[in-house]
Image (cartoon, helix red, strand yellow):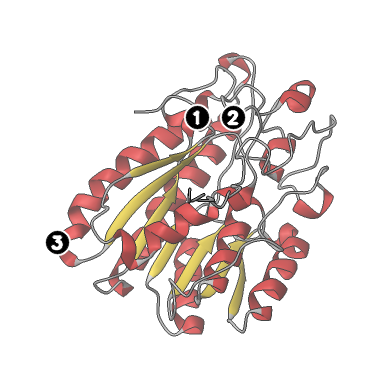
Amino acid sequence: MAMTQRKDHLTFDNPVTRHPDITPPKQDQDMPGLDAELEPQTDRGERTYRGTGRLEGRKALITGGDSGIGAAVAIAYAREGADVAINYLPAEEEDADRIAELVEAEGRTCVQIPADVTDRASCEEIVRRAVAELGGLDALVVNAGKQVATESIEDISDEQFDLTVKTNVYAMFWIIRAAVKHLEPGSTIVLSSSVQAYSPSETLLDYAMTKAAMNTFGKGLAKQLAPKGVRVNIVAPGPIWTPLQVVDGQPTDQLPEFGKGQPIGRAGQPVELAPAYVFLASPESSYVVGETLNVNGGADSP
């Protein structure tokens, strides 16, 4: 008798359609921008991210943790078992309160630290409060950023250049310098760079420059701290839909086409970045040091 063997057919998520292909309407927010007012809303994993305990007992500080990528990381870290401190500007309190609710709903602690990272003393105070109120620190995510699209170098003011460099480079240096003495073996640092570090847009000269600096700084710091058992890695996002884009981060008339030029055909959502930050903070990545993990929808990168 002939035997018939049936194979179960498994259906997997298609990454092209897993998240919507958004066409954002032209919109503009005042600095620093809010997730609560963004159209369409972002997906930070509120309903979809499921943790597996990979960061159980961790104590994490996330700058820019109120919205966008930082918010998605805070939600994911909490669902993986970590307590978190989130830093943000005072004007972003509405977004920060929402993230704190989501973190605390997981039974985790959320320390809210409003402060401007362009000030050295504030950066040191952010670290001090995180350590004091979390009871230590073993995961640091440097994510807060400033991006302003400018058509010509002649239109980049000294003030804009200074604020971009202070937010993206000085703050990174100040916060890490203050945090290192608290990081025991097994601790991790993850920096948010950008595809702009490799493929700079002509309208983002100052921003792209700072992200390249961050990438190089992270790789050098990784070599310095690796013998101490502290790992440093970098995530380089591509076009991700966040409030950064509508506070002059992109030219307003180009917003409807945001991200559509990627090989995957759409912009990314913050939740699609969270697993990279979880992986790099978890013991699973113990032999990953000084790596730049590109999450960009298929764009070429080194």
Q: Is residue 142 visible?
A: no
Q: Residue at x 43, y 71 (%)?
A: 54
Query: Distance of mark 3 from mark 2, alpha carbons?
Result: 39 Å
Q: Position of residue 253 (x, y in %)?
A: 79, 21
Q: Looking at the picture, which amino acid does disc 3 mark?
A: Pro
Q: Are marks 1 and 2 in contact (CB under 8 Å)?
A: yes
Identify the mark nearer the N-term, 3 or 2. Answer: 3
Q: Position of residue 285 (x, y in %)?
A: 31, 59
Q: Residue at x 65, y 51 (%)?
A: 68
Residue 155: quadrant of the picture: top right
Q: Is residue 65 visible?
A: yes
For mark 2, what is the residue?
264
> Which element is circle 3 on?
helix
| Other-residue count near label 2 (Cα within 10 Å), few / some / many at <14 / 14–19 / ≥20 | some
Closer-to-camera residue (100/285)? 285
Q: Residue at x 23, y 56 (%)?
A: 287
Residue 15: quadrant of the picture: top right
Closer-to-camera residue (36/271)? 271
Query: Distance of mark 1 from mark 2, alpha carbons?
Result: 6 Å
Identify the mark nearer the N-term, 1 or 2. Answer: 2
Q: Looking at the picture, which amino acid does disc 1 mark?
A: Gly
> Which element is circle 1 on?
loop
In the picture, measured across the screen, residue 267 lies left or right of residue 28, that is left
In the picture, measured across the screen, residue 67 lies left or right of residue 172, that is right
Q: Residue at x 69, y 72 (%)?
A: 102
Q: Which mark is residue 298?
A: 1
